[in-house]
């Protein structure tokens, strides 16, 4: 049962919160990081 594996459930939640910065990466206030979950550049939070 997939719901009994919290790691998988958390990962699904994190994937849905991926925010690739795309053309706006140059304007990130705190710099840019590559998301380990999505593998896309995101603004550091």
Image: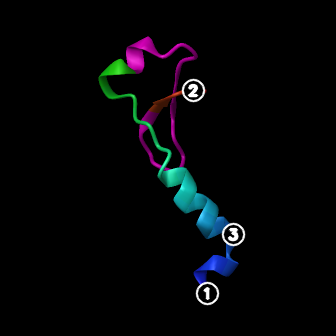
Look at mark 2 in the image and give the residue it sits on.
44
Q: Quadrant of residue 30?
A: top right
Q: Vertical placement of 18 versus 20: above or below?
A: below
Instruction: Name the residue that disc number 1 marks.
Output: 1
In the image, residue 36 sits, relative to residue 21, either above or below, namely below
For residue 6, the mark is: 3
The stretch in magenta equals: 25-41
Which residue occupies 63% across, 60% down? 10
Magenta span includes 34:
yes
Q: For the view shown, which residue lies furthest in the bottom direction?
A: 1
Label 2 with label 3: CB-CB less than 8 Å: no
| Helix, strand or loop under label 3 | helix
User: Which tag is nearer the camera, tag 2 or tag 3?
Assistant: 3
Cα–Cα span, label 2 and label 3: 25 Å
State the image coordinates of residue 17 (x, y, percent, origin top left).
50, 45
The x and y percentages for residue 31 are 53, 18
């Amino acid at each position: 049962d997939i719901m009994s594996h919290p790691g998988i459930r958390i990962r699904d939640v994190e994937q849905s919160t991926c925010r690739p910065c795309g053309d706006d990466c140059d304007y990130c206030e705190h710099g840019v990081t590559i998301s380990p979950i999505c593998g896309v550049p995101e603004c550091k939070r």
